[in-house]
Amino acid sequence: MAVRKETEQAGLTVNHPHTTGRIYGGVGCTIAVLLAVLLAVLLTLFALFAPLGAAPAWAQEPTDGVTQPSASPVALQIEEITPVVTDSSGFAVRVTIENHGTAAIEHARLAVRTNAQYNFVSRSDVQAWAEGAAMIPTPDELLTLDVGTVEADGVRTVHGELHADAGQLRALTAWGPRPLTLELIGEDGGALPGTTPLQTFLTRSQAGLHGERTPAINLTVAMPLTSHDWKTNTAVTDGLLSSGSGSVRPSDAVTLGADDARALKAKDELAARFEHLQIVGDPLVLRAVGTPHVQAISQPGMFDVTTYARVGDAGSYTRAGITDQGWRAETGVNLLRSALGDEGAQTRAIAWQGEGSWTMQALNTARAQGYETVVATRDFALQDDATATTETYRVPTDHGEVTVLTAQSTLSALAQQQPTSAQASAEQTDAGRLQRLIAQSAFYQMEQPYESRSLLVCLGESTNSTFVTSLMTALNSASWIHLASIDELATAESAIEPSQMPDLINQYVGQQMPAVSTALEALNALARSRDDIERFNTSILVAGQSAQAAYGSSPSAAVQESGTASPQSPPSAAPSASAQASARLSADAWAQYLLQAHDAFALPALSPHASAREAMVNGAQRFADALLSRITLVPSGSLNVVSETASMPVTVSNKLPYPISVRVSSLTDSMEIVTSRLSDVEVAPNSEAQTSFVVRVSTSGTTVAREQLLDRHDQPFGAVQQTTITSSLQLSDKSGIAIIALAVVLGLLGLWRQFHRKKDPDE
């Protein structure tokens, strides 16, 4: 805003000579020559010194990453670098040189240089330097490292370091971010042809320097502990379909891979090393972590609250197996208590932003579900972004006030391992992104050094523990930063008067959001698979007696899966035969287990991640298909009929632990060879039952009978089976006897007529 106007004014001043340098009639040739010379001098001076001031207006807005930087045959990548230079840290750097050219690079050296006296004057100045668009001189040499020869298509890595008492570091007498250049040079000290310098930042802390200390920026670093790598737990789903034991928990139908669980545990363990790292845990993953160290919890499964509000159809979610109770704040707290084994555990519940925006409708929905705090990771910019300011807001809703914590966009993007633009070459590695994040935070403090501000940095869900370790280590060394808790941020004063918030949100938030078509497709698919299970429960399964509770608990406790602990032995336990018998569920309780297992797929399927959505929707459908596929038809294969009627046997196999009652239909494609239409059959658990159809034949020939399983409401399921029926009628059957009898009658009638007819007189 204000920075932009100042930059544009600078541009107008620079461009002014172009509009005033015209010479009209009446001016002598000598004056024209002098003015031309003067103009050339001014342009030369501008080219030399303009980069030291404000950046041109076009460099002001960060690029969108569509335009790629120009390719260079030699690429430099920062692998490691000291993000914060203190009086005791020293400086170290490790750089990889990749030669993509056709010729070897020989006698090369890597020069690491800075400008100890330069101060960045605007955000556009910082961005232009990161993108290589600003030509700031860096005359102060820190290191010169021998590279040697880099063969064509070869890679070399060089490393260098300075001790804390090195003169090059003592020359940094003022704190703040400085430009840093890494450049390949030849023996003559000049840049090697075909190489492009890498431009990043060197940030000196206030440690060991004299001068006034201004208020530090309050920085809250929040890391969601969640996953979108959910998988089907085939051991649980198979066990649920083959056993009626209450020891199998339906909620375990989905699980995390071993690698993903280890990565989550590694991130959770960082809380012990960095007390200011604010972990917001997904209640569904806390059980996989073991004993989680969380400062807050999110909605279970990172359920997309913003998309739920946009769809505006709670019924479609219920049909898919997602009830409002499944993602309420109190449900998440119950899951946390179960994971910790502490019924008194309590923590802040925070609704994390999904694919949509925190519109007033979404905030109303979140507050109604018990979430008093939400995190806006993007699209909630309600203030002038000329400087970094506290973005904590209080918003009144129909169900009470909700606090919105808005992530600082640039710092959060870097913390989520994303470069600020495709042209920022140094930010293509984690080390380069961390270097920019530290420099950017220092610049924010220097923008308004006497104002206390609280900023939120949101890490990405896929951010690895190694990068988080580097980030938190660097922030702990940043003297201009005070690492604050999420509770401190949430209790900060609202940046805007709460009464003004609804109008501002309606005006500026949610103007561009992705379509909800993918969510609707997932809901429809989940509704279909759940319908299959409900149809099995009501129209195929034979209801049993009242449920016998698992290990003596009540029937209702045996089927609770909404975050409350049930007194069941863990799946790994090996109970005795008597215990197994007492743990057996009734058919009704087992039917509820089937629905709960399906719903375990549904909740993470409606998270913002496409990969989780696809995996969970497919997993739910496979589970429903596996249930119905355990009921199969075994046809007789082929049947030879030598009489008018015959019997066609069909076997129904039930591989489920409870009895079923179904119908079998049969239909032929011939009118001369037909079968009876329907046959009812009841099959005991894990057994087979045979039924038969009457075949009626009126002629010789061949046809195919198609058998299909039907539920008790005549709705088909399962695969269609075929039986080939071949008819060969013989005279020995009733039709043959009838033909012979008819022939005898006709013969006798002919003889009678022959003897009793009147003869002609001449005969």
Image (spheres, rainbow, N blue to C red):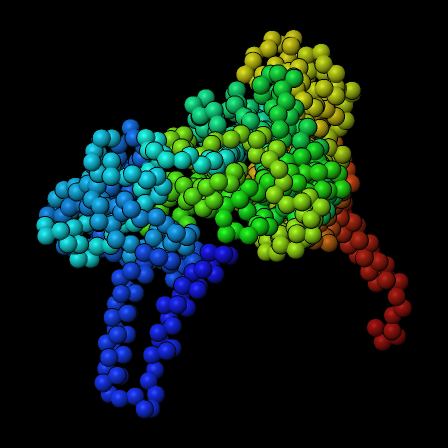
Is 73 above or below relative to 708? Answer: below
- Counting labels gives 0
Q: In this orientation, which residue lies closer to the viewer: 34 or 737?
A: 34
Q: Which residue is drawn at 88% across and 75% down?
A: 761
Q: Which residue is drawn at 82% across and 60% down?
A: 750
Left or right: residue 465 versus residue 283 is left
Q: Can residue 278 be seen in this view?
A: yes
Q: Is residue 688 visible?
A: no
Q: In this orientation, which residue lies closer to the viewer: 584 or 231?
A: 231
Q: Residue at x 26, y 74 (%)?
A: 38
Q: Residue at x 66, y 55 (%)?
A: 507
Q: In this orientation, which residue lies closer to the viewer: 90 or 734?
A: 90
Q: In this orientation, which residue lies closer to the viewer: 604 or 273?
A: 273
Is 138 above or below relative to 763? Answer: above
Left or right: residue 593 versus residue 422 is right
Q: In which quarter of the image is the C terminus?
A: bottom right
List x then y, in percent, for residue 355. 58, 47
List x then y, in percent, for residue 744. 79, 52
List x then y, in percent, for residue 6. 45, 60
